[in-house]
Amino acid sequence: MIFASDNWAGAIPAVLDAVAAIGREGPAAAYGNDSTTARLEARLAELFEHEVAVLLVTTGTAANALAIAALAPPWGAVLAHEEAHLAIDECGAPEFFAGTRTLRLPGQRGKLDAEGLAARLAEIPRGLHHGELSVLSLTSPNEYGLVYAPGELAALCDVAKAHRLAVHLDGARFGNAVARLGCTPAEATWKAGVDVLSFGGTKGGCLMAEAIVAFDPALKEKLAFLRKRSGQLVSKQRLISAQFEAWLTDDRWLSAAAHANAMADRLATAIAAAPRARLAWRPQANEVFAFMTAAEAERLQAAGARFYDWSVAALGPEDRPEPGEKLWRFVTSFATTEMEVAAFAKLLRG
């Protein structure tokens, strides 16, 4: 009953097979000058219905940090939700590689809204002493498992562009968002106004593969230098490209995400029916949040369930835990089974 994180899951068999097959093919050009990487770049352009610059890295932290560095000058400022991974869980990597500072904005359940963003932008001091407002970074699904619909995303991007901010989307679980929304990858990104996407493959079934997808191809050279300088240019790049290519083939990325989302729905239903737990809100991707006491959580964990407690900093008054309760996060993955969820549901019933 592993619901700690989708990072705990292994890799999709087809991804492993693709890496093994590339490894047996013999020598090929290094540093991304190989046919596998070229095919992947063409596939991503097709997927997003747009000419793109694609640079693969091995971690989501690198993808986010280098994306910000490509969009903002060292004296720039980045706006992000106060609970965003980029703001609190990257150990200062965006600031280190970009030289920027991050301004943290409030928003209920981890989401920003266009009206609130516009009001905040009107209040932030400008000028030489404050740095240049440069990037709005959004996350979908966010830290509370919620997604931005294309209309919500477009409204935020419109506000950002009116203030001459570029828009970055942290899509560590981008597949889960697209699978839930039922929209196209283009509608969830550049058609709404996103400039650069951190397209996560690792959580969705790759070994270690993240793609920086820039919808302005002119950013490719700048990103290439940033990737090299950060130690993220992998000499045997084809082994990273092969993961992403196999993951995208036959829409495995979407079917894996849809399965994880479906397991999250089942888990949410089980929690909602439990006598000693409360479902916080219905999941929109593959993260489920529940309120329960520490004693109840310890009982479940002692029986083999794995999950974490979570911050309540971004919750509104109606979302707050009752006295004695804490907020807990459960994450499903492509590898989560119906039997696993059923076993946990039985455990919840006591």
Image: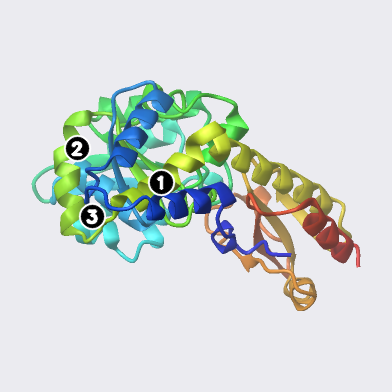
The answer to whether residue 26 of the structure is visible from this angle is yes
**Of marks 3 and 1, the one in the foreground:** 1
Residue that label 1 marks: 242
Q: Amino acid at mark 3?
A: Leu
**Of marks 3 and 2, the one in the foreground:** 3
Marks 2 and 1, how far apart in space?
Answer: 20 Å
User: Which numbered disc, 2 or 1, marks the residue that appears first in the sequence?
Assistant: 2
Name which residue lies at 59% across and 60% down.
9
Quadrant (top left/top right/bottom left/bottom right) for the C terminus:
bottom right
Q: Is residue 99 above or below residue 42?
A: below
Residue that label 3 marks: 233
Name which residue lies at 17% across and 55% down.
228
The answer to whether residue 131 of the structure is visible from this angle is no
User: Which numbered disc, 3 or 1, marks the residue that appears first in the sequence?
Assistant: 3
User: Which numbered disc, 3 or 2, marks the residue that appears first in the sequence?
Assistant: 2
Category of crowding for the residue at label 2, using alpha-carbon neighbours closer than 10 angstroms: few (below 14), some (14–19), many (at least 20) = some
Name which residue lies at 37% across and 50% down.
25
Marks 3 and 1, how far apart in space?
Answer: 15 Å
Question: Secondary structure under badge 2?
Answer: helix
* Position of residue 316 measured from the top left corner of the image (x, y, whole percent): 59, 49
Question: Secondary structure under badge 3?
Answer: loop
Asked whether disc 3 touches disc 2, contact meaning CB atoms under 8 Å apart, the reply is no
Marks 3 and 2, how far apart in space?
Answer: 13 Å
